[in-house]
Amino acid sequence: MSKHWRTVFFGVMAILAVVIVVLATPPRADAIPAFSRQYNTSCSTCHIDFPKLNDFGKAFKDAGFKFPTDDESMLKIPPVLLGAPAQSELWPKAIWPGSIPGQLPVGLRMNNYFQVVGANRGNLTGGGVTPPGTGFVPRTDFETGFFSIFTAGNFGSDIAFWADDDISVAGANANGGLGDGYLKFVNIGRFMHLPKDALTFRVGQFELDLPFTQARSYNISPYDIYTEANIGAINTLFPQQNVNNGFALADAAQGVEFSGGHQYGGYHYSVAIVNQNTGGPIDTGTNIPTATGGNNGGLGFFSDSNFKDIYGRFSYRFNLERNAESRHSIQAAGPAGPRDHTYLRLGVYDFYGRSVQRFTGTNGTLTAREPFYRLGGDFDFGYHGVFNLYGLFMYGRDHNLLPVDSEGALLPLPLATGTMISGFMNGVPATFSGGFMQADYMVYPWMMVIMRWDSVHSTADLLNGAAGSPTNFPFAFNTTRNRFTPGVQFLIHANIKASFEYQIRPQQSVTVGDNGLPAQPFRTNAVTAGLEFVY
Amino acid sequence: MKRLSVVLAVVMVLALAASAGSISGKVSGVTGKSVVYVDTIAGKTFPAPAQHPVMDQKGLLFVPHIMVVQQETTVDFLNSDNVQHNVFWPSIGGDKKAGHNLGTWPKGEKKSWKFDHPGAATLLCNVHPEMSGYIVVSPTPYFAETDASGAFHIKDVPDGSYTVVAWHEGAKTQSKPVTVKGDTTQDFTLSK
């Protein structure tokens, strides 16, 4: 048996072993995360396969983490009033009355992983164009994922809150730390006599209103295109690009967002104005106010520029039920009980920002402000909450300002230490494209099979790898990187899930051929098993 | 003559009353409400009750949690919540062929179902899996629910030999032969 097939064999056996254990355990629906406790209801009231939301869960979220109607009568733990409702009659001579949840709405989520990597893993640390690594990539590995705490709810007056934090690691954003933390003022359009839910305002740190969430994804591996940063090509085979934009669409953003409509039917829009954070340097000198205050005071800074980025999204969801009443309800009325709608949602999104790079020049610090955008469309088709097919396309483009010397001649990149520049000139823009498509099928209410295709097209990633400085993907062998990821997920209970993925990964290389391009491709496929629970 | 008729009628009523006993007892081994009923009596049928008891869905709960009805009774299922519910039961008395799904209906409306199969039906809602309720269908009009202490009293049971069934949520159903002659006592000890 070859090494490859041994990997596959052991991977399949590992999956089968866990599947048998899972199937031998009768499923129960007694999950009790934060909202389950408050409403004394199962996770599956809002989730298909946590954290994937069903139509009711989307309406619950739209309403500011409340039941869309009759919320008070559904709460099993009454809220604590921070003022009698009649206090509102005294305003502005009294504080407007609000409430806090009757029980601390805290949920915890923990996951663990087991990974089996293909035999080709040894190539990654073997000979190549870069100094071979001294590390070792194990065939099998146990890993802890994250242990996050999240709290969410409603303070009355349609003011919702959310905060989640990965407390298992230090860091921020994708590296742990605060995920989302925001206040959401739901349906403020009522003060302007706008239609219900036409205008909602959110402020804080949040994931952008992406067509398909990454922060609360139910997949083990992320969508590749969401994490694609745009690093321009620095390779003599290609016109040089002075683009070093670390922005990725899945990054948490700080700012404000206006939104409206519903996720479970009809239109939905959002417009966010957020910090620019493209990975540029932020001054932390002694006179700069820091986040911790102290003698300097202040809050510290997150932006690497004065410019604020803009994100916009619009989608329309067509519920395809024949019966008009059912079509406009939160959930459809099926012959065997309520269920998710059959629907088709179409959407577009656009992110516009400026990537900033600062250089020491003959006239002090010179700043290259390179406008960039990420533009795309998406579709989402669901059938009765049993089958879901969705996909997204993205095109990314960064303006390219190349450094020039005092005579206007291009300076070779990367700049040698101490190189003085005099200005910039336009170069070939750095672009990439890609997307993903995924199909989910609920075999049983506790078993979901998944097939996903990720694709990223980036010439720069290929060239940078060949030049020995891989950035987004280590030594891509092709300009287009395709990844196929079949998977299966089992709800052992409504709050405990076992997930499996087999990643058929893109070809990669550690060798450069005579033509200066990667040679001798290989794949490092991997089987990943995850076990997570929330409570 | 008229006086004689009255006397005869009184005598007959007294005679009937004398032959109609009761079954009392206690269900132990479990806590909470149990149901005790006289099982099918061979060769005897009973008219269907005209009254429609109501099983409500309110606050994500079945109200009442347990209902006992005579076979052939029509139960009205009401949705008092502003969220969608449904009601289905996978089986009645373990007979999966008697399972049924009533579908969906909006707040304030009812759906009715005639229970013509004896045994316990577990009521479930397919969108709120934590919800459950029970309708225990008695093949005879002789049934009772226990009180908090587990005591029950089935009245107006004609003298004779019967099979008496004790049911409790999540426990094994128990049947016992009982000969009724006047007021009769029969206890049950159930286990899960």
Image (cartoon, grey):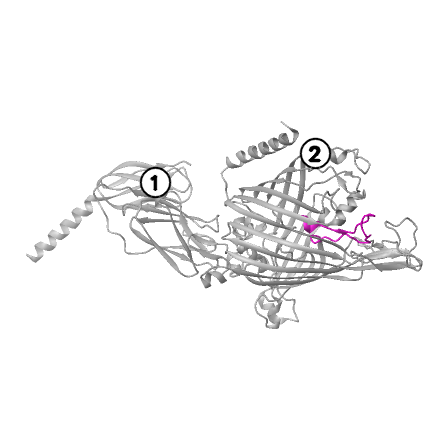
Magenta-drawn stretch contains A332:
no
**Image quadrant for the N terminus of chain B?**
bottom left
Residue at 59 percent of width and 69 percent of height:
A190
Q: For the point 53% across and 59% down, which residue is it?
A: A71
- Look at 50% across and 62% down and name the residue there: A328
Q: Nearer the viewer, mark 2 or mark 1?
A: 2
Magenta stretch, main secondary structure, is loop
How many residues crowd mark 1 within 10 Å: few (<14), some (14–19), many (20+)?
many
Determine whether the residue tagged by mark 2 lies in a helix, strand or loop: helix
Which chain's residue wears label 2? A
Q: Which sits in the foreground, A63 or A88?
A: A63
Q: Nearer the viewer, residue A70 or A284?
A: A284
**Amino acid type at mark 2:** Asn
Q: Are marks 2 and 1 in contact (CB under 8 Å)?
A: no
Residue at the location (19% across, 45% down)?
B18
Q: Which residue is mark 1?
A: B166
Give the distance between the C-alpha atoms of the residues marked 2 and 1, in whole angstroms: 66 Å
The number of discs equals 2
| Quarter of the image that includes the C terminus of chain B | top left
**Residue at the spot of label 2:** A120
Q: Position of residue B36 (x, y in %)?
A: 33, 43
Q: Is residue A140 visible?
A: no
The kind of residue on which mark 1 rests is Ala
Give me the chain letter of mark 1.
B
Residue A248 among magenta residues: yes
- Residue segment shown in magenta: A224-251
Residue A532 visible (yes or no)? yes
Where in the figure is residue B127, as x and y percent of width and height?
Answer: 48, 51
